[in-house]
Amino acid sequence: MSPRHAGAVVLALAAAGLAVPAGAADPATDAMQAAYVPYREALFRTNGKAQAESERAIAEAMRAWRAFGERFAAAPPLPYAGDARFGATVDEVSAVYLEADRLIRAGRLADAHEALEKVRDLLAGLRQRNGVVVFSDAMNAYHAEMERVIEEGPKLLRQPRGPLLLMAQVGTLEYLAARLQAQAPPALQADPAFAPALKAVTESVAALRAAVLDGGDADAVGRAIGALKAPYSRLFLKFG
């Protein structure tokens, strides 16, 4: 990706209302985070029934990742220069995109969404192997626990002392929500849309906590659990 093309991407993201990643310490991480923006859009669009939007989003994500690979796969700069699996990871991400594109074209958006989740893990693993930490890592940690609560929460309520078991998970979710604020770089904190979006996430966790403490009524807790995903998805799409 040439500097001119990179600048055009940044301007396009800003025009679309999507947060441009704050500068990292190295050009590869900067470019990786820029390519992550259309990935977030593809993940968001496939989590519904937006066929045309999903097709456009995956095409843009693939273009951005292809440019990243052309620029860095053969000769990654520091801190990735010593990573023997850097090129293989770039190829693995490309393979996920190809599979997701095939599924989207077949109208299988839910399957495409599940496939695209692998990109999040591949890039997180790539950064972790090389000692790079970005805000997306805090978002990923919250997402993993949120999904656990969504899947296990209703089941826990049916067990003896279920509300107590669920409250332990809620406590973890509260901690990870607080880390989103602590880990946000100055550029995100200065964005006027960030605080309201993060507040919606923390309020959804607080509402779940209140529902569990208020007797653990299964219907009320279920509604609160069901309300966790939407505010996270909005925060992830714009800032994740």
Image: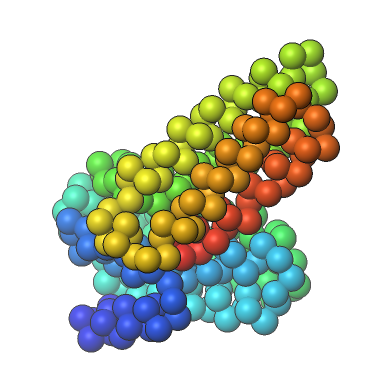
- Residue 153 can be seen in this image: yes
- Residue found at x 80% / y 30%: 217
Q: Nearer the viewer, residue 176 or 57?
A: 176
- Residue 32 can be seen in this image: no
- Residue found at x 59% / y 30%: 170
Q: Position of residue 178 (x, y in %)?
A: 42, 39
Q: Nearer the viewer, residue 213 or 230?
A: 213
- Residue found at x 67% / y 82%: 52
Height in image: 140 above or below 238? above
Q: Nearer the viewer, residue 7 or 229?
A: 229
Q: Nearer the viewer, residue 217 or 46?
A: 217
Left or right of 10 on screen, residue 27: left
Residue at the outermost top position: 160
Marks counted in the figure total 0
Q: How is the image coloured?
A: rainbow
Q: Identify the image quadrant of residue 175.
A: top left
Considering the image in quadrants, where does the C terminus appear? bottom left
Height in image: 115 above or below 169? below
